[in-house]
């Protein structure tokens, strides 16, 4: 457990696994599940190091609403119908309405279909911003459809996928100017008590081991291992655990408050985010010059956001 890179358990997997770990009373920390459905069910034995999507996704919308001039006025939102993506779309909608943007189209569509009709309808609505709640594959297909249809909004926002190597590789130069959100990047200044110590050192180790830069879900999965290690040290136990030790481990996780290369890890013990990590700030990102940079909101900005994005024909 100590310094491994645990495999992530995404939303659908976590929602399937949680009732089983609950039945057999096995502590579990997911490092890549963002669906609010998980935390609202208040599973005793399930914890998560990534905040829920409705805490992460709004950062890019907030940045566009407050940190660019002139600010966009309208947004169209498309989400995929799965346990994660439709909540990302809803988070975009809520953030847009709170920021005073008019939502001119909101649609949840099945995964794996031809997205051309959807993007055609979005183009007809002529929004300043297109926000896509999906994983990388569907987002890439929608962005390719937008280019083919000559649809050039002033900004495209995506969650989750734009931080992954597959997104940059799959879209190439067409990934330029895409906005997204995260809770971790290698440029952050966290200092932890773990062997990595800083985001930059973790990114260096990860790159050397796997040949690709880490995104926030991979960092969060490693942080899950660190959380387990810290809690096990607190109870003075090592696997395999008997049931009393497992319950002691849950109690220790509920009291956990540690600093890591990933940032603080502190699990909520009440409310809609029960057992989710609530100590991280959401960061707006944008792809500029083939790299992912921090563009807001507010004081979290490292470089200025580029807005509006140039039309496809003018790049």
Image: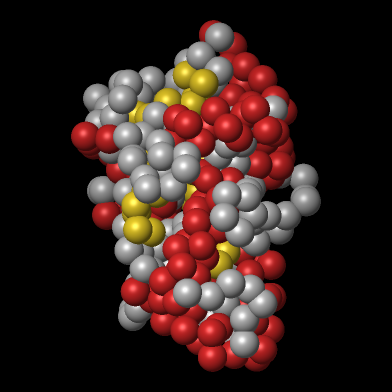
Q: Residue at x 61, y 59 (%)?
A: 1
Q: Residue at x 60, y 41 (%)?
A: 161
Q: Residue at x 25, y 31 (%)?
A: 67
The quadrant where residue 309 appears: top left
State the residue in front, 158 or 211. 211
Q: Quadrant of the C terminus?
A: top right
Looking at the image, can residue 203 be seen? Answer: yes
Q: Where 274 sits versus 213, above or below?
A: below
Say whether residue 165 is left or right of residue 122.
Answer: right
Q: Where 277 sits versus 287, above or below?
A: below
Looking at the image, can residue 33 be seen? Answer: no
- Residue 49 screen position, x and y as percent: 47, 60
Q: Where 174 sits versus 46, above or below?
A: above
In this rendering, the count of numbered labels is: 0
State the residue in front, 257 or 315. 257
The quadrant where residue 304 appears: top left
- Residue 293 screen position, x and y as percent: 42, 26
Residue at the extreme front of the image, as rendered: 236
The quadrant where residue 176 appears: top right
Q: Residue at x 73, y 55 (%)?
A: 111
- Residue 96 screen position, x and y as percent: 34, 50
Q: State the colouring used for the structure image.
A: secondary structure
- Residue 278 screen position, x and y as percent: 35, 62
């Amino acid at each position: 457990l100590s310094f491994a890179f645990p495999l992530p358990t995404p939303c659908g997997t976590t929602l399937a696994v949680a009732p089983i770990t609950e039945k057999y009373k096995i502590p579990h920390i997911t490092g890549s599940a963002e669906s609010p459905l998980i935390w609202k069910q208040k599973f005793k034995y399930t914890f998560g190091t990534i905040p829920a999507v409705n805490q992460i996704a709004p950062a890019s919308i907030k940045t566009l609403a407050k940190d660019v001039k002139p600010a966009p006025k309208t947004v169209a939102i498309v989400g995929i119908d799965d346990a994660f993506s439709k909540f990302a779309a809803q988070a975009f909608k809520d953030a847009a309405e709170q920021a005073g943007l008019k939502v001119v189209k909101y649609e949840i569509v099945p995964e794996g279909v031809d997205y051309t009709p959807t993007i055609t309808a979005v183009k007809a609505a002529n929004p300043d911003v297109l926000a896509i709640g999906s994983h990388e594959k569907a987002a890439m297909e929608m962005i390719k459809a937008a280019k083919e249809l000559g649809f050039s909004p002033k900004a495209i926002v995506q969650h989750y996928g734009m931080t992954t190597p597959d997104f940059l590789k799959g879209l190439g130069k067409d990934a330029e100017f895409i906005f997204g959100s995260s809770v971790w990047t290698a440029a952050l200044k966290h200092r932890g008590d773990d062997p990595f110590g800083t985001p930059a050192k973790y990114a260096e180790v990860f790159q050397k081991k796997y040949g690709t830069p880490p995104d926030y879900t991979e960092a969060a999965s490693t942080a899950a291992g660190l959380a387990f290690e810290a809690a096990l040290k607190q109870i003075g136990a090592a696997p395999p655990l008997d049931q009393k030790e497992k319950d002691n481990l849950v109690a220790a996780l509920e009291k956990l408050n540690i600093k890591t290369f990933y940032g603080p890890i502190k699990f909520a013990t009440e409310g809609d985010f029960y057992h989710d990590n609530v100590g991280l700030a959401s960061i707006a990102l944008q792809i500029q010059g083939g790299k992912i940079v921090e563009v807001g909101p507010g004081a979290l900005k490292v470089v200025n956001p580029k807005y509006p994005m140039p039309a496809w024909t003018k790049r």
